[in-house]
Amino acid sequence: MRRIHPASIRPALVLGMALAFGATGAAGEPKHGIAMYGEPALPPDFVSLPYVNPDAPEGGRIVLAEVGGYDSLHPFILKGSSVYGHRVYGYESLMGRSWDEPFTLYGLLAESVETPEDRSWVEFTLREEARFSDGSPVTVEDVLWSFETLGTLGHPRYHGAWDKVARAEATGPRTVRFEFAEEDRELPLILGLRPVLKKADFDGRPFDESTLEPPIGSGPYVVGDFEPGRFLSLVKNPDWWGADLAFNRGQHNIEEIRYEWFGDGDVAFEAFRAGAVDSVREFNIAKWNVSYDFPAVRSGEVVKSLIPHDRPSGIAGFVMNTRRAPFDDWRVRDALIHAFNFEFINQAINAGEQPRITSYFSNSILGMEDGPAEGRVAELLAPFAEELLPGALEGYALPVSDGSEANRRNTREAIRLLGEAGYTVQDGVMTNSEGQRLRPQILLQSGATQMINVADLYVEALARIGVEAEVVTVDSAQYKERTQVYDFDMTYYTRGLSLSPGNEQMLYWGCDGVEQEGTRNWMGLCSPAAEAMIGEMLTAESQEGFRAAVKALDRVLTTGRYVVPIWHSPVSRLAHKAWLHYPEDRVQMYGDWIGFQPDVWWVER
C-alpha cells in the first residue's frame, strides 16, 4: 500500500476508513501504558519496574567484548556497520517496554497514550520535560519527522509499519496522532517503540548516508571516545532528562559502557581471562564446564551466573537460501537436515547437554504441538492445504540419530530424498541430470569459532552422502554485505523470538524480503500461508486466537525446512567480575535478553 502524505489525505478516505474499521473518531482514554492484550500489569503510580533494584548505586564502568568491527555511528539506516548498544542506549522512543510482561509499554518520552477499542488510531502526549542530549526539547515536529523519515529513508525494519499509516498530524502542542489505513492491533505499540531523532540535526545533511557523526538522541548515554574497529565508549549524560522517571528508576546505573572489538571469540575470551573485559556470555556449555576454571574464578574475582528465562527458543542453525537452486526444492533441504547429525555434533561440541530447537517457537506456550494440527490451528491452515509441505497438517518432527558418527538411518533417508529431487551419486559426488554437482558453500564470519567447528563436522557428514560442501569465512564487513544482499548458499542464522510476535514477523518471513535487500528473510521465504497467519496474529482480539495463529505459523515455518536447527538453552550463562551485580531475586521473564545487561546492572566494589 502506498503512503499518503498527512497533508494530502482526502476526507472521503478518512470516512471510508471509519466505515471499514469502526468509528475512528471514537473516544479513547489517555493511559500511562498499553498492552497488546488486556491491561498493563503496573498501575499509573508505579515506583519502578519489578525487575530492577530501585536503590542501585550509580557510577563505575563496564567493559564488554565484541567480535568484528564497525564503521558507522548512524544506527538507523541500512548502510554501514553500526553499534547495537549505541542505538539502544543513545536514543529513546515514545514508550518503553517492560521485559516482565509479554508485550506491554509504559510512557517514556510520552506521558500518555490513547487509542480506541478497535485501535484504528493512536495518540501520544509528549512529556513537557523531555529533552535531547543538547538540551533542546523533544517536539511533536521531531516525532512526525522521525517517523516519516525512518519509514521512508531508514532501515527497512521501519518501513512496514509506516506503510500502514494513513494520516499523521499534530493535534496539540504536545500531542500527535496516527490514523491507520488497515486493521492491525499491534500498530499503536509498534509506533510507541519507534526512536525519536532531532529533525534540525539533519538540516543540510542526508539522512541515508553512513557517518561517524552520531545523530543527536535523548537517551541516557552519549558517544564518548571511539576508534572504528577497536573501541567505542558510551558515557552517561549527566543532564539526562529522564533520570527521575519511574520507568527508568534502577536502570542505566553504570556511568560508562565501553565496547572493545576483537578478531574472534577465542581472543575475546582470553582478554576476559586477563581481566581486560568485565563480562562475557558463553554459548558453549562444554567450554563453560571446563574452561572457566581459571584463577580469577577460583578466587571469587569472577562469578559464573546462570540466568533463567521463559522466552521461546527462536531459531538458530544453517539457513538455506531458496532464491538459489537447488535450495528451492524442499526435498533437497529435507535431505540436508537429515544429514545433519545433531546428536553426534551436540555431544562433540556441548557434551550432549544442550536441547535441540524443535520449532521456531519451541520451549514456549506459542510453539507447535506434537501430532496433527487440531482445532483453530487446523482451521487456519486448511485453506492452504495444497501449498503446505508434508507434516504441516499431519504432524512433523526433526530426524533423530542414534548418536553414532555413521548416522546410517538418516543418511539413507537423505540419499532417498535427493534421489527424488533428481540427484544420483556419480564418481562419489551427488550430481543431477544436467551434470551439476551438489556443492553448497557455508558462509561464516571469521572468528565464529564454535560455528566453524560445527560446520566442519557437518561438512564431514555431508561428504558421506556425496555432497561436497565447503566452509567459507569472511570478515564482519564482508559478512554483513553479503547477507544484506543474500549472497550465500547457506549461512549461520539466528532469530530471537518473543512471547508477543507481531509486525516484525513480516520482515522475517514476508514475500517482500525475497527481492528487497536488508530484510531478515534470509531464506527467501514467500508463503501465502505464512503471511496469512501473520495477518491473523495482528488482528486477533483474544489471547487464544493469537496463540492459535502463532502455532499455525510455527508449523508453516518448521515444515518449510528452511533451516538446519541446532540447539538452544533454557538458561543464559554469564561470567562477570564479582563487583558487577544484577537483581538476582527478580530476573525478568525474558531473562538475559534485551533490557538486561548492562541495563539493570550496577557496579559495587
Image (spheres, rainbow, N blue to C red):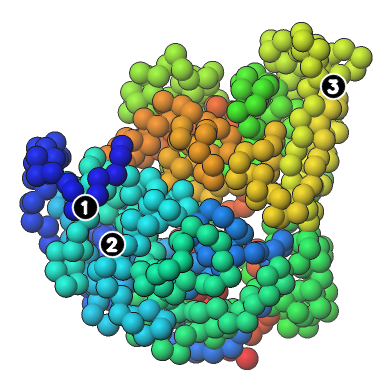
Looking at numbered disc 2 in the image, what kind of residue is underneath it? Leu
Is the residue marked by circle 3 packed among few (<14), some (14-19), or many (20+) residues within 10 Å?
many
The earlier-in-sequence mark between 3 and 1 is 1
The residue under label 3 is 466
Circles 3 and 2, Cβ within 8 Å, touching? The answer is no
Residue drawn at (35%, 18%) of the image: 383
Distance of label 3 from label 2 (alpha carbons): 57 Å
The tag earlier along the polypeptide, 1 or 2, is 1
- In front: 276, or 19? 19
427 on left or right of 369: right
Quick check: marks 3 and 1 in contact, CB under 8 Å?
A: no
The answer for how far apart the CA atoms under marks 1 and 2 are is 10 Å
Residue 151 in the image: state x and y as whole percent. 38, 52
Number of other residues with Cα within 10 Å of mark 1, as a class: few under 14, some 14 to 19, many 20 or more: some
Mark positioned earlier in the residue sequence (3 or 2): 2
Q: Pointers 1 and 2 in contact (CB under 8 A)?
A: yes
- Find disc 1 in the rendering and name its residue: 6
**Which quarter of the figure is the N terminus placed in?**
top left
Quadrant housing residue 111? bottom left
Quickly name the residue at label 2.
144
Q: Is residue 28 above or below residue 247?
A: above
Which of the 4 quarters of the picture holds residue 267?
bottom right
Residue 417: % across, % down: 70, 15
Q: Is residue 492 visible?
A: yes
